[in-house]
Image: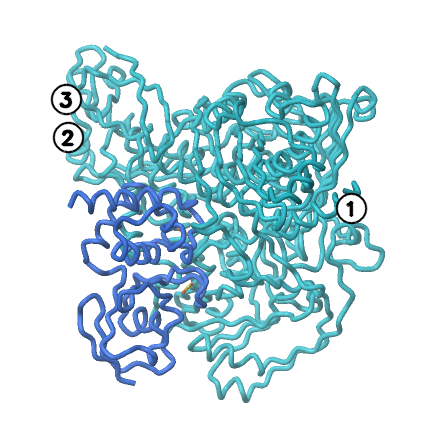
Amino acid sequence: MQRKIFIIIKVAGAIYTQTKFLNLTLGVVPLAVGKPLERKDARIKVKGEAQYNFDLSFSDEQYLAVVRSPFAHARIKKITVDNEKLEQLGVTVGLSKDIPGKNIVHVILDDWPLLAEEVVRHVGEPVAIIVGKSPTVAKSAFSAVHVEYEVLPAVFNPDEAKDHPTIQVFGDNNIISYWQQKNGDINKGFAEADVIIEGEYRTPAQEHAYIEPQGVIAVPLGRDEITIYGSMQCPFYVQRAVADILGYPWSKVTIVQTTTGGAFGGKEDQPNQLASLAALGAYLTRKPVKYLLTREEDIENTSKRHPAIIRVKTGATREGILQAVQVEYLMNSGAYSTLSPAVLYRGALHAAGPYKCPNVDVQAYAVATNLVPFGAFRGFGSPQVLFACEEQMDRIATKLGLDPTEFRQKNLLHKGDTTTFGQVVDHSVGMSETLKQAKEKSEWVQKWKPAPGFNQVIQESRKGKYLWEGIGVSTIFYGVGLGSAGKALSRTGSYVQLEPDGSVVFAVGTTEIGQGMITVLSQIVADELGVEYSKIRMAPVDTSRVPDSGPTVASRSTTFSGRALQDACKKIRTLMYEIIAPHLETIPSDLQLEGNYIISKETKRKIMVDDAIKIMYQERGQVAMAGWDVAPPTDFDNEKGQGNPYVTYAWATNIVEVAVDVQTGTVHIKKIWAAHDVGKAINPQTLEGQIEGGSLQGMGLGRFEEIVFTPEGQVMSNNLGTFLVPTTKDTPSIHSIIVEDPWKQGPYGAKGFGEQPLMGVAPAVTNAIFNAIGVRISEIPATPERVWKAIQDKVQEEAI
Amino acid sequence: MKIEIFINGIFYQKDVPPDHRLLDFLREDLGMKGTKKGCDQGECGACSVILNGKVVNSCLIMMVQLPEHSEVETIESTDSMVLSLQDSFVKRGATQCGACTPGMIMATTALLRNKPKTNDREVREELSGVICRCTGYQKIFDAIKDTQEHLERG
Ligand code: FES
Ligand code: FES
């Protein structure tokens, strides 16, 4: 007998509702999926026992220091090495000519040298490596490597860099990549619109500020093998990069991920370079070489979120129906292409938002400049355009005199609708549900009223009313997985092994970076095999254990490693039924898994999985299976600007309440409601952790975080005292709302969403600022200076 | 330089290089790697330990500055407050990547010892020196409340 029961679990203040079928005939069945089970890695982490890159040691280990360019753009005229001094110090120096393989760090387009040969294109570009027995010794040899430069003119702004007549950073026009989205006829769309709004928006370089700085250790094995240990998201990227640099066969390069203290995209492609530098050091010295970055080195020289300029023109009818959206997206890519083509792809496709709109024209460019290469950061090119898009939506709603949630509701995608790039979203479309729930929980209807007139704000502030409250909203979506641009990487492997005592060890190629992957995948394996969660263990990620499973990015680990594990577990079940059938006096096809039992559908005779595993071991020996998954097909035609670029979409609504001090421009963020359609919450607690942490990073982007460069292109805010991230004092209360509209092809209906919590908070903040004081913010973060200036500009403009 | 010091109640007498900070002493001289680090310059709080009853950034304390027979408490402590917080952090999912966690737990230990009934506002004030980039702090606040309740019940 099956009974449908409705369970309400209260996890950390957020209401999480779930409908679940429990089979009550079997008594207590501890199913793992859907439960807020304890994180697998929590115990060692709270004790300080987890080993991060800086906790590891190897005998006779050496340290790496990197000689970097002080100039944003310069020709290397000569490099002189003081060999006598090197000998005195006992250090080894490596230049580009010492690289045994190719002097290219492979990411996508192969333009990124490991060590500069003729030209340096950004401040901090590596020119030489030094290996010594301590970081101090290695750094003391900087004076022994003399590089003579001829300084060249540099360009830092993508508007100037695009098609620059004389400064060439990449190719002949500095355009690294171009994507477009096209729908209908944009001119016709504007002609039929009753209101048109135009805006220009700017977003900053944002540093990931993971608490564990980047670091890797290269350990040579004999003369032609190497193992890299380190903090990273994508071990298979690193394997390929190191093999190319050293000219080793891939089989002789092993990458082992160590406990990674935060990543957020920052440890996607960057470890390719860092591991290659350390590997070169290990190759030259035949000793283990550590490259552990200091916080300054890390902020100055590793990737960040692309700063961007976004120009948008939006048209709608009087009734509030979108007619036309035109976007120009200029992404500042820095000096090398690294991940920019992929980042831009996602940005271009998210630029018109989760709306229906018959006429769309998005033109997106990744432009090379003489800044440090920008790369992946949670949201991957989409937070920039979503900020612009959601500001525009709000401005139109204001112009039409509509409640911004109602205006959005008229245009949001529903089940069966077609996206602006031509994909029919046929199921798992919880968009409106997130809006509905976020509105309810935040009491939007009671709280929202049109923004006060700016005149009124100023007059009253002159009489002493400085603090003004407001509420703002954004509605966004997220294409799950790598999509068609990353098709070749959209495959995952897995390995599942039953131990003779009934416990299980599994391996995958995606990584735990704090997001909770080990836990969630263990829950999936537990239910797929009917083994208790406590008996499941994930092995450390090692490139020699499973086939290339692509990167840990694009919110894909739960979904796609989950699918690969389901594949392996299915094979194990098949074998299990074969072996167990005679014991239950039936045939394999009559057997099925129910909780921790294998049960005959016919006779209801059953056996505990734990016992079945022991029988399998006796009769068959140890059982292990490999799993494989290829993501469902995707396609996108850049000529037409149309296609089915992602397998499915996650959806979200953010509502933010602020209080703005008009005297100082300070914005206090009081509350955030974050409603996310995730398909299925495999672990509601870790999922809430993703929502809360991502929301705070999104708030950081909207309100605090900005990497500032000097006019010479050097990172100025190079520590955590000048690059400010939200602290306990700044964090508002964050209310997570989980919506589950299952995706049929996801494990238990789950679809990836880990990036989404960051993506829509910034525009909800700026929209709330408008709602409080009647001033629009076009550039984030909304720091006190920026808000204050926007207020003063408007006072001037309106002559109040 | 000879140092006499108590770490988690255990007496140590050691020769320490004069340029070593408390963080280096713990991690390198004693090999106690539970204390983590994120910046080496007093900005992230990951290296927080309790020194003579007060939470400090161990990366900023030079060993030569320490008063003789100082008492240091680290995440390796088996004190009941530390254990209780560790337990609540696990149950509430208050650790993600974990790099901030030892520092966060030590900073909270110092706070709860001084003010067992501390409120939300004070918690936010007192812990603002420890940055967590993963959790958004909500579950850390929940874990602290749980520990407070637990301690109240005895
Ligand atoms: S490592 Fe000491 S405060 Fe960051
Ligand atoms: S758990 Fe990652 S920094 Fe706090």
Mark toward the start of the polypeptide (3 vs 1) = 3
Color used for chain A?
cyan
Amino acid type, label 2: Asp
Chain B: give its colour. blue
Picture coordinates of residue A23, whole percent (x, y): 24, 17
As rendered, which of A365 and A549 lies closer to the eye? A365
Q: At label 3, which amino acid type do we have?
A: His
Rendering quarter of residue A483: top right
Q: What is the chain letter for disc 3?
A: A
Lateral position of residue A502 relative to residue A777, left or right: left
Residue underneath mark 2: A611
Which mark, residue A583?
3
Q: Who's the residue at 38% across and 31% down the image?
A: A14
Where B125 falls versus A586 (above or below)? below
Please state which of residues A537 and A357 is positioned toward the viewer in this rendering.
Answer: A357
Return the residue at label 1: A796
- Residue A131 point in image, percent of width and height: 48, 75
